[in-house]
Structure formats: C-alpha cells, structure tokens
Amino acid sequence: MKVVVPRERVAGETRVAVTPRTVKRLVRAGLSVHIETGAGSASGISDAEFIEAQATIVSDPHSLYTDAGIVLGVQPPDAETIARIPAGTFLVATINPLIEHDLVNRLAEQRVTSFSLDLVPRIARAQSMDVLSSMSTLAGYQAVLLAAMSLPGIVSYLTTAAGTLHPAKVLVLGAGVAGLQAIATARRLGALVWGYDIRPVVAEQVESLGATFLDLDVAAEDAEDAGGYAREQTQDQAQRQQAAMTAHLAEMDVVITTALIPGRPAPELVTTEMVAAMKSGSVIVDLAAERGGNCALTRPGTNYTTDSGVTILGPLNLCCTLPAHASLMYANNVVNFLLHICRDASIDVDTDDEVTIGTLVTHDGQVVHERVRQVLEA
C-alpha cells in the first residue's frame, strides 16, 4: 500500500507527519512511503535523510497522490488537497472535526475514510497515539520559557552580594497535560508554583510536582467527563471561581492558562477586572488563544502590554516553535496509530475496536463518528 506524506501548507506549520525512523517502521510493515519534496525541511529533516530511510521523494504534488492508499498529515487538508485524494483513500491527520464542519462534509463527499488523531481516546493502550498529550507537553514547557523571557526579573531564587532576588510566583490554571508540564518546568526553573483546576481529583498530581494546589472550594462533583477532560462550568460556578481567584492573581508574577473543552470555545477564566487587579510587570500566557483564549483581554497570535503594565501573550500553535521534537513526537504517535489499524499492509476498519471507532470520522461517503454527526446535525 502506498503511503503519501504531503508538505504542510498552513502558514507557520513546521511539523511533518513522519521522520526517517518512522519511515523505516512503515517500510518494515510492508508499506511504500512517498514524501513530497521539502516536507521535512522546517523540522530539520532533509530529503536525503528520507531517501536513506527508503522513502521515495516526489516533486510534483499532483502525481504524489496517484494510487495513494494512505495519506498522513499534520494539519487538516485544504479543499485543493482533498480534491487530489482518490476516493477510498485513508486519511490520518489532526482534522478537528468538531470545529471543521465543512472539511468533514468534503471528506465524506470525496469518499475519503478519515481518522482524526485529536479524537484518540484517553485510555492506557492508546497513550502512545495521543497527539493532543504530546503537543500539550511541548506547549506547557514552552509557555514557561515565554513567560520567563517576558518578566522584568528572573524566575529563580538567587542570593548575591548585591542583594537577594526572590523567586517568581507562578499560577497555572488547568492541570491537564499542558498545565502539569508547565508546573514541572516552572518548578525546575526555581519558581514558587501554584496549580488550580476545577477537578479536585488532580490536586495530588499538582502536589506531586512540588506545587501547591489552590483550593477555591467551588469545584463541582461532576467536573470531569468520561474522557478525563474538564466539563464546562455553569455560570454560577464560573462567577464564584473568578471572585475567589482575583485576590490570588494579584499576588502572582506569572499566570499560565491552559483550559480547553473539546469542540467548544475556550472558557473565560481571567476577566478584565482580574487583569486590572494584577501588578505591573506580571505576565499572562494564554495557551487557549487558538480557541479564543481563557483571558478576556487575550488577542490570539499577539503579545502586548496593557495600560496597567500586564503583559498578555496569546501564542498560536506553540508546539511549532519546537519543530524537531514536535515532529518526532507527532510522527511516533502517527506510526503507532497507523500500525494499530493496519494489518498485513492493509487497513481493517474494525468498528469493535475502541481506538479505531473513536477516531473514525468519515467512511463510505458518510460521517460515521457519532459525536461529530450530532454536532453537524445541530
């Protein structure tokens, strides 16, 4: 079966869906890998390295898809790319089907069987395929470094002949993968760290990293869904949380927000009034900027300082600033998933397998993922 890896065409995207090491794994599994010229250049991977791994480099993007059996990608394909994919081809990428509704319909019309890696269920045997966790790990790490570079002082405690420098106080809102990695990174840099989440069950994880769990006593018993994600709060819960949080934010040097709800806009955790209460020189890094932001004043894709002296960073696709490791982790997730659904160099759409059915979006010209179908119908 022919596996096709096109060059990513979304502006700012530096990742590639395969690396030389994962190409070798695919070849050993009996697959033929064809990669568009320059697909790995932004990640520091040359065409020569892919050729050495027994991949075929194709310069013409039109002929790339001829006789394609599987297409591997990072970002959702655009309309032009979808039109080139032959009917019956399998697509494995991060499709964001709960948001990209037109894209899902196009894939169904083109009779492409698509698997969306952002839907990989968070179960033990699927951890090696969990793209969201991999990319969130890098984003949480990088968020702390961005904050450190934006602070008017250093992060760690330091005693010098010229005086004592006190450590920065860091608050991380949301203790998912990105939040926990941010906590761990801030602690390694020597900061005093607090973590908060509406799910009290994660308090032990926060404290195991050497941080203090901020207990605002506003969490609901059903704050976590079956997939381990935080549920959306009621308006009353959100208001009580914000009121209790304001005094804590006023003491912080850095606030990193990470709260996301799958398929929904990012919940607002930091209001305009809360930002106004923060001290001049403090920094907010909003990792939910791609979904509108957790801070009311976030400008997605923009860094700026408010009139009161608070710097607000709204980075987009932050893992792309670490292309080498982002591609390595993403490609490993992809090949682990592909070899899970691929048997004897062919793909069996096993609807009894939780991982397969959980990621399968379109098949035989239909939208088959139950939740995606419900969103489209709504």
Image (cartoon, rainbow, N blue to C red):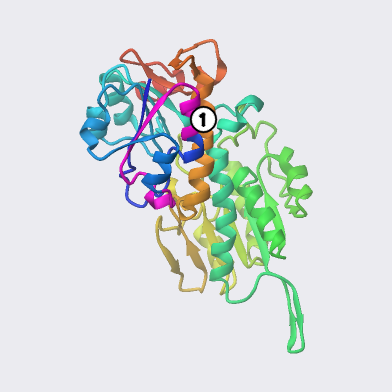
Residue 329 visible? The answer is yes
Is 371 situated above or below 157? above
Q: Residue at x 29, y 17 (%)?
A: 111
Q: Position of residue 76 (x, y in %)?
A: 36, 36
Residue tagged 1: 25
Q: Residue at x 48, y 44 (%)?
A: 327
Q: Residue at x 60, y 37 (%)?
A: 230
The C terminus: image quadrant: top left
> On the picture, is 145 further left or further right than 180?
left
Residue type of the residue flagged with mark 1 = Arg
The residue lying toward the viewer, choosing from 310 and 53, is 53
The residue lying toward the viewer, choosing from 277 and 225, is 225
Secondary structure at badge 1 equals: helix
Q: Which residues are magenta?
A: 23-45
The residue lying toward the viewer, choosing from 150 and 160, is 160
Q: Position of residue 166 (x, y in %)?
A: 73, 75
Is 235 situated above or below 369? below
The reply to whether the magenta stretch includes residue 25 is yes
The reply to whether the magenta stretch includes residue 355 is no
State the image quarter where residue 360 is shown: top left
Q: Position of residue 139 (x, y in %)?
A: 54, 51
The residue lying toward the viewer, choosing from 211 and 326, is 326
Residue 118 visible? The answer is no
